[in-house]
Structures are given as C-alpha cells and as structure tokens.
C-alpha cells in the first residue's frame, strides 16, 4: 500500500547562526515520528500560491509549534503579552489549514498548531497564562523536552479518548499561551488540573485534533497511539 504523504509546516527565521539569509527549520523528530508509523514526511514551504497544489498532493497535515505567538490582532485582541510574532508564517498556516480543512483530510495541530486551529475556527487565546491564571503547573517545564512533567485529563466523549483509550496521561509542556474561548464547532477534549485546555477537536471534520503538548517526542504510549492513528487515518 502506498505510504501517505504527511505535510509538515516549517518554522522560518530571517537570519541567525545557521545562515545570514532567510532559512526554514524543523526538529528532526517531527519527521521521524511520521516515518516510524508508515508515513512519508513532507516539509511545506511558505508559498501561498502553491497551497492548492500542496493540499491536493498531501494526505495529512501537521501544523507544528515554535518559539513565537500568533498576532492577537488576528483574533480581535490587543497585544498585551504576545511576543516574537511571525506574521508571514501564521498567515500561511491559516490559509493552508482552511484549504486543507475543506478537503476533509486529517489535521494534527501540535502546541502552537493547536492554538492556530482554534483561532482559525474563530476562537481566541490567553496571551500569557501566568499573567491571568493561578497556575499550579509550570507549563514551560524545567525538565528536558523529551520527558513528561504533568498530567492531563481526557474527556470520555471525545475522539481523543477513543484513540488513546485512557482517561488521563502524562505530557511534556513548553508554552506560555493557551486557548481561552473555543472556536466554532471546537470541542474541548483534554485539560490539566489548573484548567488549561490541553487538547481540542473539530466536531464536524473527519479527523482534526489539536494538542498543547509535543507527542512527536513519542515519550508515552499515548503519544505513540496518537501519531499512529493520525498516519493510519491519512492512508484512507
């Protein structure tokens, strides 16, 4: 059987240690986890003119995270605590999400990718969870990123529960923003003990799930189950 082609969005930098010219970047494990479960990872460059052709040729889409925030003007808020905005990347990811969504092909949003799905569907974000909530959890964990740091609870009424077959699991955590108000037809499917939304899914799409943690590290059985299911659904 033909391996599904999984499009993976890239981060972008204008200059830095790697090159004094603009360059794309992605962590190796985003690609490795897809290949492990039978998919062919395909990094996606930020060309809006190519979106239609890209969407027609990939079978699943992963919207990745990164060290940046979505411009709050996009979801109708003033900038209070957002930082390091990358408008070109965000605009491209919004457009490719909307195009791919209407094809009803599988979509997985990871960390900032989860937040982008919610914003694309009309929701908004907490710009800094430490400014407005009394957190008991450090969501920018001190532990290495390939270790878990806190527990989440998974709603039994969700597709995520069907996939993971568990009402709770441990996750890694690397974010200072999170979802505030859910977008249209978005279901809250997991949360942490301090009330932060840890996973969402779209109720009118074949397979559209966003998670606030980084399952591409494949730390837990649940991480493996999520990536495995995403790749399998992308074959159909």
Image (tube, rainbow, N blue to C red):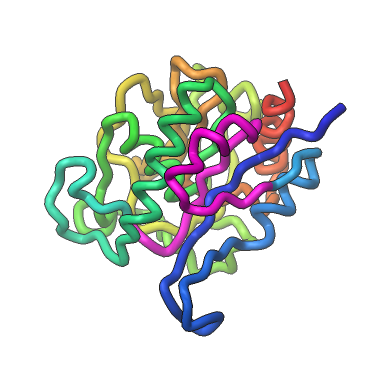
Q: Is residue 171 above or below residue 52?
A: below
Residue drawn at 53 percent across, 50 percent down: 9
| Image-quadrant location for residue 27 | bottom right
Q: Is residue 121 left or right of residue 189?
A: left
Q: Is residue 124 left or right of residue 46?
A: left
Depth check, front residue: 211 or 204: 204
Q: Is residue 192 visible?
A: no
User: Residue 174 appears at what percent x and percent y?
Assistant: 46, 59
Q: Is residue 28 above or below residue 78?
A: below
Q: Which residues are magenta?
A: 42-69
User: Residue 7 appears at what percent x and percent y?
Assistant: 61, 43
Q: Is residue 140 above or below residue 228?
A: below
For the C terminus, the quadrant is top right
Residue drawn at 51 percent across, 28 percent down: 208
Residue drawn at 41 percent across, 31 percent down: 98
For the N terminus, the quadrant is top right
Q: Does the magenta-highlighted stretch encompass residue 84?
A: no
Q: Is residue 37 left or right of residue 122?
A: right
Return the residue found at the far front.
49
Residue drawn at 53 percent across, 81 percent down: 19
User: Residue 93 appears at what percent x and percent y?
Assistant: 42, 45
Return the residue found at the far left.
78
Depth check, front residue: 76 or 212: 76
Depth check, front residue: 178 or 23: 23
Q: Is residue 93 visible?
A: yes
């Amino acid at each position: 059987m033909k391996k599904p082609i999984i499009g993976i969005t890239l981060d972008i930098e204008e200059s830095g240690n790697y090159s004094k010219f603009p360059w794309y970047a992605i962590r190796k494990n985003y690609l490795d986890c897809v290949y492990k479960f039978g998919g062919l990872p395909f990094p996606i460059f930020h060309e809006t003119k190519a979106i239609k052709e890209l969407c027609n040729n990939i079978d699943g889409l992963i919207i990745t995270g990164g060290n940046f925030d979505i411009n709050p003007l996009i979801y109708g808020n003033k900038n209070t605590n957002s930082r390091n905005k990358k408008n070109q990347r965000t605009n491209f990811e919004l457009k490719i999400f909307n195009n791919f969504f209407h094809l009803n092909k599988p979509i997985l949003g990871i960390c900032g990718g989860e937040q982008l799905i919610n914003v694309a569907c009309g929701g908004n974000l907490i710009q800094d969870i430490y400014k407005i909530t009394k957190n008991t959890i450090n969501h920018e964990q001190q532990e290495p990123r390939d270790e878990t740091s806190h527990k989440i609870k998974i709603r039994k009424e969700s597709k995520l529960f069907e996939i993971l077959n568990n009402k709770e699991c441990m996750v890694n955590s690397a974010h200072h923003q999170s979802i505030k108000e859910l977008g249209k037809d978005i279901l809250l499917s997991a949360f942490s003990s301090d009330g932060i939304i840890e996973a969402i899914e779209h109720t009118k799409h074949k397979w559209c799930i966003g998670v606030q943690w980084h399952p591409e590290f494949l730390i837990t059985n649940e991480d493996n189950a999520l990536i495995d299911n995403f790749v399998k659904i992308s074959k159909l």
